[in-house]
Amino acid sequence: MTGNAHAEKQVCITGAGQSEVGRPSSKSALQLTVDACMTAITAAGLTPRDIDGITTFPGRSGDTGGFSPVGSTEAMLALGMEPTWIGASTEGHAHLGAVISAVQAIASGMCRHVLVFRTVTQAQARLRSRSSTLLGKAGQPSRVEGANQWSVPFNAISPTNMYALYAQAYFDKYGATSQQLGAIAVNARAMASKNPNAIYRKPLTLDDYMASRVISTPLRLYDCDTHIDGSTAILLSHRDAARDLKLPPIHIEAMGMAIGGLGYGLHEGDFTSLPATRAGDMLWSHTDLTPKDVDVAQIYDGFSILTLLWLEAMQLCRPGEAAAFVEGGARIGLGGELPLNTSGGQLSAGRFHGYGHTYEACLQLWGQGGERQVEGAKVCAVANGGYGYGALLLRTD
């Protein structure tokens, strides 16, 4: 037995909320944040004054691209909170870093309840400038610094260009096909059609996918996630405090994390796996459950190839077998052996940088999935990130 030695065993998810999702939204970034946070707090039966910790990914960004327009202090003031702990920048384990930091703060005794939120207004930013969400933005100095210096000079101005290399390498090594990869996008749209808050709900067929334009070979339009405006909030509580709250606690059975150098131009191996493999190894070392116990999975889909790589990193499929597993969509549909990205994921529901996946996991485990509810869901795997890697195994009694 793994016991309770790991920090996450002390922490539960006790509330979750999401604002309206727009492309664009007429609401300000701060209003979207307040909407999501208040929904999460109210769902737990608490008030803002009960919350003694707050954090976000990655912290307020000073750019105009809408990537992270609201910081923890602004949210704290708008909500009327009086926290004792505010998380710092959550660079590292990518998007899930804020959740991991919150778990550590609660397990260490620094606070009892931590509100984690993620707000984006990239759709509003794109209205102002079509280049606002690209790596090399119009109007910036001609010299590109940081991670982008390795790609922008070669006209690789989107992460699509980099992950297309991974997709092609995966195709070449394992014989995967575009039709197999397209099953992820088609499944996402089918799930999104049952999600009232999803951006794209119009049916998508495999023929539609194959007819869509190629963005960066072999990735097509529907292999890429979509920018949105909105906010998602997750409330975490110490397991002792969680017992008295409104919703049944969702236990964080295990978590895993890893850091890689993809975002800084460091590529290792044969381009058919990610450092996420280490996150998967860590996660399963923290629990007595096994991949066969997973009832539903919310797997990162910033690009569809990432979903294949994460399925293998999370040991839900063996190396090289994920493409065949998703082919045709039967195994990953609502009635399949592993329902996948039941909100529509980032490909159809919108790009929350993985926070929508955690939110959807909570809805599924609370039985609040509506038409897309997976019957009897008790264990959910969540995978998050393309540059840094975080994974959760969530369960409910």
Image (tube, rainbow, N blue to C red):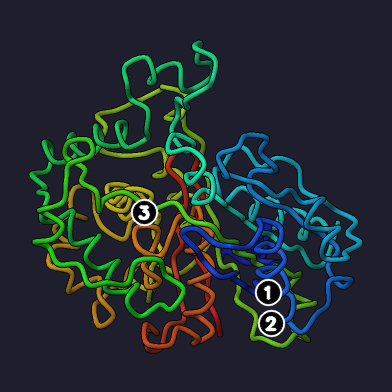
Numbered disc 2: secondary structure: helix
Question: Would you place residue 259 above or below residue 210 in this image?
Answer: above
Which numbered dot is residue 301?
3
Identify which residue is drawn at 80% across, 77% down.
241
Task: Name the residue rendered at 70%, 50% in the picture.
Answer: 70
Q: Quadrant of the C terminus?
A: bottom right
Pointer 1 residue? 40
Q: Position of residue 315 (x, y in %)?
A: 33, 56
Label 3 vs 2, first from the N-terminus: 2
Q: Are marks 1 and 2 in contact (CB under 8 Å)?
A: yes
Label 2 sits on residue:
43
Q: Image quarter for residue 230?
A: bottom right
Name the one closer to the observer, 57 or 192: 192
Where residue 336 appears, x then y in whole percent? 24, 78
Image location (x, y in percent) of residue 31: 70, 63
Element marked by disc 3: loop
